[in-house]
Amino acid sequence: MHDDALEIKYQVRGLTRLLYLPPPQWPGVRFEQGEELDVTLHVTEVGVMLEMDLDALVDSNDARVRQLVLAWELQLGRRLTLRRIGITSALSKDDGRAKLEDAVMFLDHCSATIVHAPAPAQMPQVPLAAERWVRTLAETSDFTGYVEEQLRRHYLIIEELWEPYASQFDTDDQAKQTSVRLVRNFVSHAECRSIEVVAFVSGQLNSAVVAGKQPPTVRFDRLSPEHRAFVARHEVESGRIARRLVHLAIDDLPSMPFLA
């Protein structure tokens, strides 16, 4: 370690396969993936001087690593766990001029599966301004087996981003967005009497019609395999549309190019 260097160590957990093979050679970053498949990142800053604001330097690197993890999460549609686990500095702190708090940074996400591939030449990054959208996409992995919850989360993104980007989707996708909206309304109410929703659902899922109800009413039964299969078909489209919307929105963010 250089006499003027600062090393910050991060751990990313939840991976189930090798991430990159061979490991990346990103400037200032040493990438390690152990037998347990956890990733350790050693980020080194050289040319560090005592009069620098070291805490601000650590914060800047925290943000850069968070952007990397967001890029992985967007690629996977899964959540990861990121922790800052150590800070090492060769600078003397005894004279009172340099202060650095070795605090733990923790970002609570969960597991992921990555098929190992050659590492990109540049460290993937997603702007932190997109973190809310990426997190919403990644949260769907928490609801395996609950397709209605996955579709609802997709629709949070669609509802927010559809209007500015609708013109970039073809007629077929615009019709699918409408279908996703109707299914979201179907699964989000104990009973649904919307004329539009009833017409759409009853035409494809007659068992959802509540017998004897006036006005005509449909009800989602999450215990019914037939109902879950109906929603699952639309969840595939909701996920695809939501992901594309996030990519379009990221490309419009002014802070940086999208490298994932």
Image (cartoon, grey):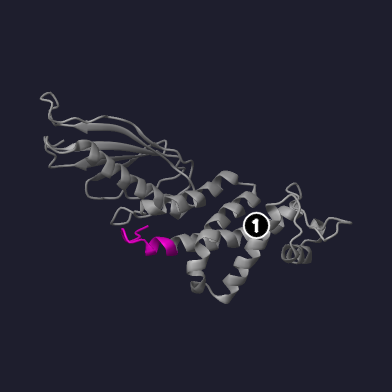
**Relative to 215, residue 89 above or below:** above
Residue 145 x/y as whole percent:
64, 47
Give the left or right position of residue 224, taking residue 50 as reference: right
The image quadrant that residue 257 belongs to is: bottom left
Question: Residue most toward the top?
Answer: 94
140 or 35: which is nearer to us? 140
Please give the name of the residue rendered at 38% of the width and 47% of the height, measured from the top-left corner.
69
Question: Residue most toward the front?
Answer: 215
Give the left or right position of residue 12, taking residue 241 as reference: left
**Relative to 237, residue 98 above or below:** above
Q: Name the residue under label 1.
A: 184
Label 1 element class = helix
Image quarter hosting the C terminus: bottom left
Image quarter hosting the N terminus: top left
Please give the name of the residue rendered at 50% of the width and 60% of the height, measured from the top-left corner.
243
* Tally of marks: 1
Main secondary structure of the magenta stretch: loop
> Is residue 26 found inside the magenta-colored segment of the image?
no
Question: Residue most toward the right?
Answer: 212
Please give the name of the residue rendered at 50% of the width and 74% of the height, measured from the top-left corner.
167
172 or 252: which is nearer to us? 252
Q: Please tell me how crowded label 1 is: few (under 14), some (14-19), or many (20+) other residues with Cα within 10 Å.
A: many
User: Which residue type does callout 1 highlight?
Assistant: Arg
Residue stretch in magenta: 248-260
Give the left or right position of residue 213, taking residue 219 as reference: right
Give the left or right position of residue 171, taking residue 186 as reference: left
Residue 225 x/y as whole percent:
74, 51
98 or 122: which is nearer to us? 98
Residue 131 x/y as whole percent:
42, 50
Residue 39 x/y as whole percent:
36, 40
